[in-house]
Amino acid sequence: MSILKLKPSCKDYIWGGHRLAEEYGKECRGDVLAETWELSCHPDGPSVITNGVYTGKTLQQYIEEEGRKVLGTHCKRFRDFPILIKFIDARDNLSIQVHPDNRYALKNEGQYGKTEMWYVMDAGKEAFLYYGFKQEISKEEFARRIEEDTLLEVLNAVPVQKGDVLFIESGTIHAIGKDILIAEIQQNSNVTYRVYDYGRVGKDGKKRDLHIEKALAVTKRVPIIRDKSSYPHVANCDYFTVDRLNLDGNVMKKMEGNLSEESFVSILMLDGKGKISNEGETLEFQKGDSFFLSAGSGTYQIEGTCDALITTIREKAAPVRIGIDIGRTDIKIGLVDVHQKLIASMSIPANSLYGSEEIIGEIGKKAMGLLEENGISMDRCVGAGIGLFNQIERQMEATENSESVYWDKMEITEKISQYLPVPVQVANDVDCAVLGAASLV
């Protein structure tokens, strides 16, 4: 089967309303339904399959059983499932917040950072949201205004209406205002740093936590220009490409697409009703439904009336790879571009490090530093390859016998992934040398 209908994970955050239950048929056990995570493999709220042989299993379980081929070749560069898609109903103002980039989030939170986009599904007459600053401010002024409760005076308030799109890159201060209904496509992350929360209290009667120091570290304190360069797409970046589909049932009654081996397709139905078909399978859809179509499953059709967002993963722009050679006496780290050209390299004396934790930690820090020194964002990195000498000797003291550190491939892969949020491949260094020589023939 290639069409999966998904049931979302539901969130009852204090600022939420009830429209997602009333108008979109989402299940709600209480008075508040703030968010529904429609396409999610995140452990904080996985979506569940409701049709076929995988009924009752999470999307993540489906991927694990079927293999990562269902995600497509463009997803090979991601360590985890790349995106998370939500409906958001803001009855009240959300907190003023910011999301870190991959580098900061991985180091401090153990997961990806967050770049996202908002598609405004509906908005009240006076609805607005906060998007960046009115003018550039210093870090000192930013901190002072948070302390003095005057931050809102320097934030850029943007009026919105149905159909508006905003792209929120990591590091952009922002907040959804009250009386707005939004579809959000984002990186697969749940890291949010609150800066200001209107003095509200949570269910426990206490004020919700703020994350001032982290926010000061990651926020871009400049005005944000709304970028329209994603045309003809609604949004287009290295994490997701989003297109809008509108079938009016009259002039446009049917859309036909193709599921190549490059990417899966997510279809989020904002409105309408009809049928979706692929590989002899047909499912009915209505307003609010979410579907996952696996990569490589050929032609699919959508018939009826609909307003939908279709999300895919594009090929990485200007990819860079990290090469690491762990030897007896030296550890070498290099950056290689798409043409197999060495961009930069460095070497670390291996006999100055003791134990696998220290070795891997130092490799991770140096690799990230090498990227930064050469002006290459972590987002451009698509993978790391490690050549490993099976037995690595460490001379602890001149008067002591040498200590040997042994690693297997699984161990080193898991440890280095804590520092580098990309797929990691490990092989014997001799095998790597042979492969390298063969590529030059």
Image (tube, rainbow, N blue to C red):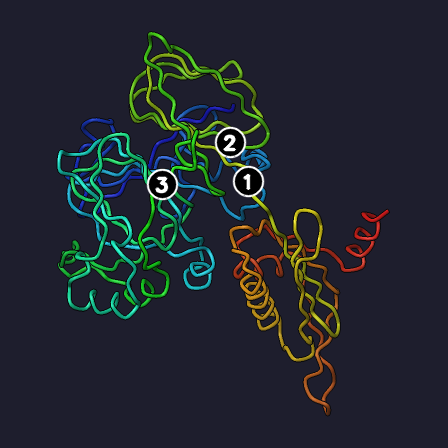
Q: Is residue 305 above or below residue 145?
A: above
Observer-side mark, 3 or 1, equals 3
State left or right for residue 223 relative to residue 350: left
Front position in the image: 408 or 219: 219
Residue 245 screen position, x and y as percent: 38, 22
Residue 109 screen position, x and y as percent: 41, 60
Residue 212 screen position, x and y as percent: 28, 65
Residue that badge 1 annotates: 75
Q: Which mark is residue 117?
A: 3
Question: CA separation, marks 2 and 1?
Answer: 9 Å
Q: What residue sits 29% from the left and 22% below the top?
A: 271
Badge 2 vs badge 1, beta-carbon distance below 8 Å = yes
Residue 174 screen position, x and y as percent: 27, 50
Q: What residue sits 33% from the left and 35% below the top?
A: 8
State left or right for residue 324 relative to residue 302: right
Q: Which mark is residue 181?
A: none
Q: What residue sits 65% from the left and 80% below the top?
A: 352
State left or right for residue 397 relative to residue 269: right
Residue that badge 2 annotates: 264
Badge 3 vs badge 2, beta-carbon distance below 8 Å = no
Residue 184's image quarter? top left
Please name the amino acid that badge 2 sits on. Phe
